[in-house]
Amino acid sequence: MASTSQLSYRSNLNFSYSALFSLGFRPFFLLAAVFAVVLMLIWALELRGITFANYYPSILWHSHELIFGFTTAVISGFLLTAVGNWTGKVMLHGHGLAALVLLWFAGRTLPFLPVEPLVVAVVDLAFYPLLIAAITKPILQNGKMKNMVFVIFCGLMALMNLLVHLDVLNIAPNMAHLGIYGALNVVVLVMLIIGGRVIPFFSERAIPDYKGRSITVVEKLVLPVAVITFLNDLWQPLALWAYGLSGLLALLLLLRVGSWFDRRLLSNPLLWVLHGGYLMIALGFLLRALLPWLQLSPFIYIHALTVGGIGLLTLGMMSRVALGHTGRPLKLPQVMHLAFYCLLVALVCRVLVLAWIQKPFLYDMSAMFWMLAFGLFVLTYIPALVSPRADKG
């Protein structure tokens, strides 16, 4: 049995292929964090006029890779781990998992290489069907069909990715915009559902006599209103009622996250980062609802959803899952406190300040603090992610 000292987070690097590819969260969380740094570095250089030959047009690459590169890696790692917990079935591991990871990696690198555009598209489009196959079998074997909703979401992501590639290949021009915003909405919906499941649960587990309580009417309305809002975005995203739907969704989300609040969670970074990410999704839709009156760029609300919502939630979830599933106590390493604050600074620079002050150095600051946040995750968690569980032995 491992001693208490062995169960502490800090451990020596003990690389093991079988450990790294034992569960999906290990390689995908690690690569997601590395890619978050690379993605933002390349984009910061692009904004400064240093361009790279690319299959995608510049801004489309940034948008596509944030969703279908970084976020997809996090979602894949989560699903390939969580579905096993939900179903009690053995998930994709070993060489099969390594092959899926390699396919994801190829999708990120081929756009910069001198290969046929069709090859780039086929390789990138192959990922989601294989991920669907990996999670569908255990769900069907388990028989709890409510989890099939995540298979549907992955199918929608595959469809949105197809729209992007059909545009880039000039088969269906002007469809990339629909694919990117459709995929962003799918990701946000996934986070609303998963966050609604796990944030109150994690809070109850961590805080004695947790005072957060759900509001029944809000719980019943929030997801249907979100679905209606996102479906309308495929039809009339600039109509006046679209802003009204965003306002209603923002109100429901604010009520939801407010009902979960207990001031004691502010002393637990693993909790406040998740609550904060959920809050940023609410504020993102509030900003969207106010766009016609505030005369702000739509990129403000988009970055509230991406840097704030997706950024905080993914970094928080990766930090927590990587502790629990590697046999370590749920005590956040001290350096990750700094990582969370770096991401908050990146958010403030990109959303709150840039809404009124258009200065290039603010883009650089936001990019730098984003890279610091995910770089610290890589440096802190790599021993745990590539080594056997701490509680084995």
Image (cartoon, helix red, strand yellow):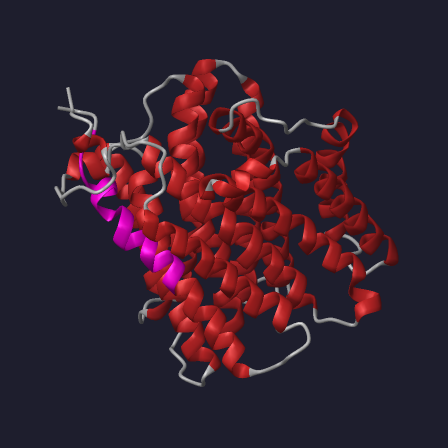
Q: Quadrant of residue 262?
A: top right
Q: Is residue 17 magenta?
A: no
Q: Is residue 108 in sight in this rendering?
A: yes
Estimate the x, y position of residue 28 in percent, counting from the top left.
34, 45
Say which residue appears at 40% left-offset and 83% top-offset: 50
Left or right: where 369 falls relative to 283: left
Q: Farthest residue in the bottom direction?
A: 49
Estimate the x, y position of residue 249 in percent, counting from the top left.
76, 44
Q: Is residue 19 above or below residue 145?
A: below
Say which residue appears at 60% left-offset and 33% top-offset: 196
Q: Is residue 374 magenta?
A: yes
Near-viewer residue (33 or 72)? 33
Q: Quadrant of residue 295?
A: bottom right
Estimate the x, y position of residue 141 in percent, counting from the top left.
43, 15
Left or right: where 360 falls relative to 258: left
Estimate the x, y position of residue 123 in percent, counting from the top left.
37, 53
Magenta: main secondary structure equals helix
The magenta span reads: 372-390
Q: Is residue 56 in sight in this rendering?
A: no
Say which residue appears at 62% left-offset and 41% top-offset: 189
Say which residue appears at 58% left-offset and 50% top-offset: 183
Q: Farthest residue in the right direction?
A: 240
